[in-house]
Amino acid sequence: GSCPGPGPKRGPRWERVLSVLLVSLLCKLTHSLYFHIGETEKKCFIEEIPDETMIIGNYRTQLYDKQREEYLPATQGLGVFVEVKDPDEKVILSRQNGSEGRFTFTSHTPGEHQICLHSNSSKFALFAGGMLRVHLDIQVEEHTNNYAEIAAKDKLTELQLRVRQLVEQVDQIQKEQNYQRYREERFRQTSESTNQRVLWWSIVQTLILVAIGFWQMRHLKSFFEAKKLV
Amino acid sequence: MGTRRRSVISSPAGLFLTVVLSQCLDLIGAFGQNQDTELTFLLPAGKMECFYQTASKNGSMEVEYQVIAGAGMDVDFTIISPIGYQLTSEFRKSDGIHTVEPTEEGDYRICFDNSFSRFSEKMVFFEVILEGPGGDAGGEDDWADIAEPESLLEYKLEDIRDSIDSVHRRLERSRQMQMSLRMFEARDRNLLEDNLWRVSFWSCVNMLVLLGVAFTQVYTVRRLFDDKRRVRT
């Protein structure tokens, strides 16, 4: 069903905040994308991000229960192994989490980061040839902000909070654009390098061809003269 | 600032407690979120990957995908509704965009198939943009509970709030378009880097073939005359 509304309006404020946040968390991961992982399967996702960017991934697993013929929350023994590699193939995060959790990392070099998930079941009997259902949600930069926290810490009114959100959004777009400019420059360099290589190689090839032609003729001529045919 | 009730949250202890509890409950990103998902993944050769997205009744779901790396740069794409009816089916396309409206209650299945390719692995980017029945992203921006009470006059507030909401939605859309353009650029870049490698490789092969043919020609002609010479005498 759809997400429930704001929640209770009475009671101490922090209680209301907590209950709303709790409901939102459950609601959020209920509506996220999910996929299936086999026992030894590894699923990898790529995130191309600028440097000094934070990424937060939330996940939740469910295991297929043959008796009840539905997916139920996985038990403690069934965990998910998360591995994050930076653009230089160096592992920057390697964690073994429970069946439900969150992983965070901040990039230090711009480029393609690889986030790989595979199941880490210590009890293979539980798996029994079934599939593990993983709900995954990966958030970048501005979307990682917890506005409830920011509102509480800086004591902001609703309007101030919304404007703060807009500022963060624009910041992220600007950061992306800067990164885009850097990538476009690299792209242009590769393009020019390819162009040069093609041109240079064609010229060298032609010269080699002509040189070989001359050599062949000269060699065969001297060969025939030596054999007294010419 | 107007009158502010002294609540638990004003005290340092209450604040600390809230922060700690929210950390424990893994609540980063719970508020101000849209429910849109964007993922880039590797699809090995000869395999199929399916993703499932839960949708609510009478909403809308937009799916956009692009193949950004891999020889051929194409993939099969299907969307299957919760009851098993195949809504879209595309073969060997490099990018596409589909909107399902109105959506049924249940899990939609979004599949990418690379079975037709025997050797090349594809990198596929896709994003799913969901909207609730009211045309909004599903009650994300109700912050009246968590923020301090307003001290401005109420009747002006609604206007300001509406325009801020509109700006927020447009910025989200800008960001999504930016992502889409970025994926096109990534695809072009990958293609170009492949081209560079291919140019270098085939140039080397070309030169080796050239030299090989040249020497073979000379050798063959020489052998031809050597044999005749021996036959004559």
Image (tube, rainbow, N blue to C red):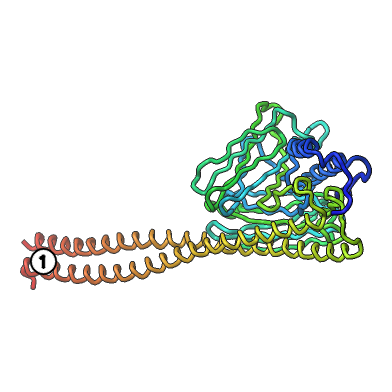
Q: In this view, does A52 lie to the left or right of B143?
A: left
Task: Indicate the quadrant containing the C terminus of chain B: top left, top right, bottom left or bottom right.
Answer: bottom left
Residue B206 as seen in the image, left or right of residue B20: left
Which residue matches tag 1?
A223
Of the pair B132 and A56, the residue shown nearer to us: A56
Residue A106, compared with residue B177, is above or below; it is: above
The kind of residue on which mark 1 rests is Phe
Give residue B206's position: percent from left, percent from top: 34, 63
Q: Which of B10 and A208 is in front in this view?
A: B10
Q: Give the crowd class for mark 1: few <14, some 14-19, many >=20 residues within 10 Å.
A: some
Q: Residue furthest bottom?
A: A230
User: Does B215 sit left or right of A181 as displayed?
Assistant: left
Front residue of B66/A98: it is A98
The residue positioned 82% from the left and 62% from the top of the image is B101
Instruction: Name the image quarter holding the N terminus of chain B.
Output: bottom right
Residue A208: quadrant of the picture: bottom left
Q: Which residue occupies 63% across, 40% down?
A: A117
Residue nearer the viewer, B50 or B57: B57
> Which residue corresponds to the image point at 71% horizontal and 49% vertical from the top-left?
A145
State the SS at label 1. Answer: helix
- The image quadrant that residue A85 belongs to is top right
**Label 1 lies in what chain?**
A
Q: Residue at 40% of width from left, 63% of height from top?
A: B199
Q: Where is residue A227 in the image (x, y as percent from the top left)?
A: 7, 66
Residue B85 percent location from the top left of the image: 80, 55
Q: Where is residue A111 in the image (x, y as percent from the top left)?
A: 54, 53
Residue A5 higher or lower than A102, as above or below: below
**Looking at the image, how many numbered discs can be counted on the residues?**
1
